[in-house]
Image (cartoon, helix red, strand yellow):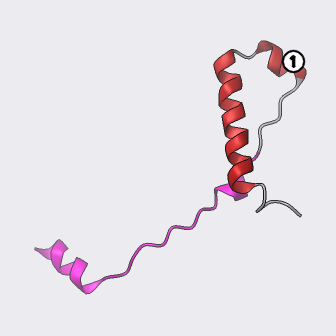
Amino acid sequence: MLIASCAKTLPAKPEVIDTSCDWVKIIYLTEHDIEVMDRQTKKDILTHNKTWRANCSSKNSP
């Protein structure tokens, strides 16, 4: 009952602010990194970098 009461008297909606582009960066690899990594790790890094470019590249451009 108390929880329902609070929900009715406080209709404030939470606001989500995405700050991931402030601390997430592209992962850079050396030739040696590429040679020694397994295929799945390479795919994961490629997915990460593509996601960053799609979501953050325009926000971090000068």
Q: Quadrant of the N terminus?
A: bottom left
Q: Amino acid at mark 1?
A: His
User: Number of labelled discs?
Assistant: 1
> Which is more toward the observer, 10 or 51?
51
Residue shown at 74% from the left, 48% from the top: 53
Residue at x-position 24% and y-position 77%: 7
Residue 24 shows up from this direction: no
Q: Is residue 40 left or right of residue 26?
A: left
- Residue with the mark numbered 1: 32
Where's residue 25, x and y in %? 75, 47
Q: Nearer the viewer, residue 43 or 37?
A: 43
**Where does residue 49 sit, x and y in percent of width and height?**
73, 40
Residue drawn at (76%, 62%), measured in percent from left and top?
59
Whether residue 56 is visible to the viewer of this picture, yes or no, is yes
Which percent across, then down, holds residue 46? 72, 32
Q: Magenta span has 9?
A: yes
Task: Name which quarter of the figure residue 37 lies in.
Answer: top right
Q: What x and y, as percent, mark residue 18?
A: 59, 62
- Magenta span of residues: 1-25
